[in-house]
Image: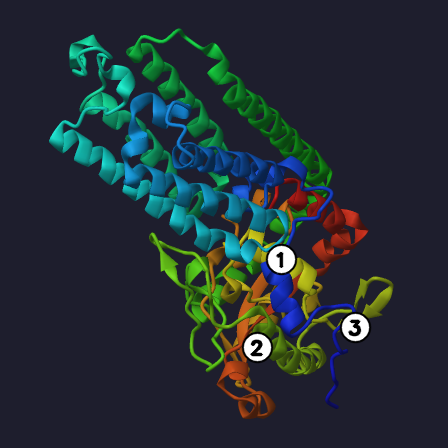
Amino acid sequence: MATVAPAPPTHDLRGPALDKAFLKWDDSSKDAGASSVFGRQGVWVGKPAWYVLWLLGLWWFFDATYCLVNQPDVGMFGQWGLCHSPLMILASLLSGLATIASSTALMIKYRGYAKPLLFIVIFAGCLNFIHSLLILASHTCSTDPSFQNSTTKEWYTEAAGRPCGLQLALIPMAYGLCQIGALFFLVAPQHSFLQVTGGLFLYNVGMVVGNIAKGATIDFGLFGGCCGFIVVGGFLKWKFEEAKKKAQALTHQDYNKYRCVWEETLKAHANDLKVLENVWAEKISVLPKSKKRQPGRKGTEGKPIVFIGRKWVIKQDPTLSELYAMADQVNPELQTKCQQWSEVLPCCASDHKGNMAKFHRGLVKKSERALVKVYRSYDEDIGRLCDLCRCSLVFDSVADLAKGLEMICDDQEIEVQSCNPLKQRFAIAYDDKISAGYRDVQLCVKMKTNTVVHMGKAAENHLCEVQLHLKAFYEKKGDGGHDNYKIARNLRGA
């Protein structure tokens, strides 16, 4: 008899509210803390870095306004006579406003608009760099009146201190490199905070060297601000390392517990484990994890924008609300199929939250956890969320699990997809430290029942996850091991 999976909880987001939550997502986990700064998303979820960016943008903005309000004797522009350069003023105005806007968007939880603004900063950096090349090519000299003889109105020679050529080009070049460096926020965000603090320090070194070259007194006070940022960065890095140690300690006891189960399994079921590996090799083709993604709204593979050799999303297909709408339709069919499997496969009854049964119904993954996963693990690529619909089956022995895997793969109402070899965690060569000692088999499938096919291509190609557990591991998981794993995962910012 067909069964219907329960509807999503009323508090779980759907529709436009879910898409809005995606744009405004904030890492509110009390466990993540400083680790988020050095996680995969770096500055985009690391709150301390937002304020550093805001101050940096304010710095560039003031550089431009000093010149615009006719104060050419203030700041680096005036000291070197660069207020006469429209390229320099425009570049600093654009980079200042865009950086302030980007960091403000993060602060008010509109992070979806923060990354596109950085392209303006990068463009401004290109303007500055082009300006420095023009200075070098023409060997331009400063037009600052402070380098002119007040009586004869003749310019001091370059040897006497008038900045020309490379000396004059150093400032726009430094600005340009720093602004073009915003690329690091997009391609290597996990290093973004270090890039900000390191860039500020090197920029201040340049200011001090520039003043020395001009004959001014050495002002070590210029290092004050950037040294403060470096101290903050060092503190956060220390907190990150402490969080990782805590995460390791949390999972260490569970790891040892799972490891004992594995050693017993390896000793008692060595031949069956080899059979399981053979079934996997025969039935499942290999696919890199990064290649697996959900279909777009038309049912074909959705494609985010590809940027600098990696996936970086501005607008994508499907949207999160579309993906969830499809998951809500497909999940009842997956649960029905999983129940049917439990009746014919060599499954065993197992306890799940006080409910002893051969089959435990699964809800669509909560949107809150999906958002965390999209940002922390998937570079904001919604299409990589392939486990919104899940079902689990538990087996008493490795032999039963291998038989169950073979029968599932032969089911004509599903289509088993290519999988990363790491999804077969009972492989003898598998490094169980990746999963804190826990082992199972995870399949990626498409539902091909008549009901799903009639829903359309997007439903037919929707990716679901089928988990095959061994009872000896599964029961240990219910003893609190999974809760510790989730806390440890947050501590690592993963």
Task: Name the residue beneath numbered marker 3.
Answer: 10
Query: Could you tell whether 91 is left or right of 259 in the image?
Result: left
Q: Position of residue 232 (x, y in %)?
A: 59, 26
Q: Residues within 10 Å of mark 2 (few under 14, many from 20)?
A: some
Q: Secondary structure at mark 1?
A: loop
Q: Earlier in the sequence, mark 3 or mark 1?
A: 3
Please state if 230 lies on the left or on the right of 169 as rendered: right
Is 458 on the left or on the right of 265, as rendered? left
Above or below, comparing residue 230 to residue 191 in the picture: above
x then y, percent, for residue 451: 60, 91
Front tag of 3 and 2? 3
Q: Which mark, by number, is residue 407?
A: 2
Viewer-side residue, 139 vs 284: 139
| In this view, the mark in front (1 or 2) | 1
Between 470 and 221, the one lying in front of the other is 221
Colouring method of the image: rainbow
Q: Position of residue 272 (x, y in %)?
A: 57, 60
Residue to which mark 1 is pinned:
24
Q: CA distance from mark 3 to mark 1?
A: 20 Å
Q: Quadrant of the N terminus?
A: bottom right
Provide the secondary structure element on which disc 3 rests.
Answer: loop
Kind of element beneath mark 2: helix
Check disc 1: other Cα within 10 Å, few if <14, some if 14-19, many if 20+.
some
